Image: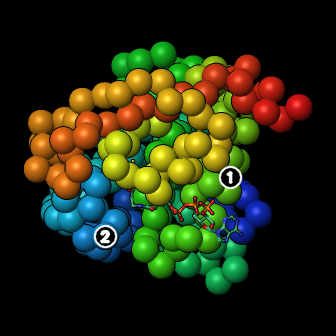
Amino acid sequence: MTTYLESERLTLRPFAATDADLLIELDSDPAVMRYLTGGAPTPPEDIRDRAIPSILAGYERWNHDLGLFAAHEKDGGAFIGWFCLRPLRSGPREEAELGYRLRQAAWGRGYATEVSQALLAKGFAELGIRMVWAETMTVNRPSRNVMEKLGMMLAKSIPVPDDMMAVEGSEHGGVRYEITKEQWERRQA
Ligand SMILES: CC(C)(COP(=O)(O)OP(=O)(O)OC[C@H]1O[C@@H](n2cnc3c(N)ncnc32)[C@H](O)[C@@H]1OP(=O)(O)O)[C@@H](O)C(=O)NCCC(=O)NCCS
């Protein structure tokens, strides 16, 4: 198994075409999908026909340096969800979005913060990234907590996409956090 990144307790690896069932199961938990779809699962055919091909195409596009990766516990190997660090498809390569989606069983253990810290370090110190951003719904406190613990700064409010207008809390809009390489370096000093 190729390892993309290791943190203290977790390993990230590229997804393979055979991993659809892991994502189908992850997206079938209404608690995981609460602030993404209002709780509805992602249809399995969307994962097989759209999500997986798009993830695999991203590895090629960014030369296996950036993308969306599967996270496993080092101790026992359990799949706990995914993390991404990736530019917009047609955006500048040095600006990347941080994202995460973890199985409920993995919440409350500091995993999201641990891996995100390692991703910021890899992005800024090794991959030529100059700015990382992350977006979530204003009411998604667990996700915002991760961003704040990473030292990301609230940059602006953003509108919630039309297809999320029915999601609980969407009337409060969304938020975008950012951290530059210089800000990250100052925190390391
Ligand atoms: C967003 C999400 C990844 C956050 O996960 P999380 O487990 O709450 O994230 P954290 O890494 O911050 O860990 C949370 C808590 O674990 C606790 N914890 C337990 N053991 C710990 C350890 N060894 N080290 C650090 N924290 C630990 C801490 O109390 C920490 O909270 P605190 O810093 O406020 O005290 C998770 O809620 C999720 O996957 N949600 C569904 C999908 C989603 O909404 N994604 C974001 C869309 S934008």
Q: Which residue is tagged 2?
A: 31
Few, some or many C-alpha atoms within 10 Å of disc 1 (few <14, some 14-19, many ≥20)? some
As rendered, which of 30 and 66 lies closer to the eye? 30
Q: Residue at x 58, y 43 (%)?
A: 148
| Callout 2: CB less than 8 Å from ligand 1 | yes
What kind of element bears circle 2? loop
Q: Which mark is residue 32?
A: none
User: In the displayed structure, would residue 120 be above or below residue 154?
Assistant: below
Q: Which residue is tagged 1?
A: 5
Quadrant where the C terminus is found in the figure: top right
User: Disc 1 marks which amino acid?
Assistant: Leu
| Callout 1: CB less than 8 Å from ligand 1 | no
Find ligand 1 in the image and state its quadrant. Answer: bottom right
**Residue 183 spot, x, y in % from top left:** 71, 24
**In the rendered view, does 152 fall on the left or right side of 141?**
right
Quadrant where the N terminus is found in the figure: bottom right
Q: Based on the displayed image, in which of its 4 quarters is residue 19 positioned?
A: bottom left
Q: Residue at x 17, y 64 (%)?
A: 40
Q: Residue furthest bottom?
A: 76
**In the rendered view, does 182 fall on the left or right side of 99?**
right
Q: Residue furthest right?
A: 189
Few, some or many C-alpha atoms within 10 Å of disc 2 (few <14, some 14-19, many ≥20)? some
Tell me whether the residue at label 2 lies in contact with that at label 1, contact meaning CB atoms closer than 8 angstroms: no
**Residue 38 spot, x, y in % from top left:** 19, 59
Q: Residue at x 52, y 73 (%)?
A: 106
**Residue 185 spot, x, y in % from top left:** 79, 27
User: In the displayed structure, would residue 114 be above or below residue 65?
Assistant: below
As rendered, which of 48 and 111 lies closer to the eye? 111
Q: Earlier in the sequence, mark 2 or mark 1?
A: 1
**Residue 13 spot, x, y in % from top left:** 58, 57
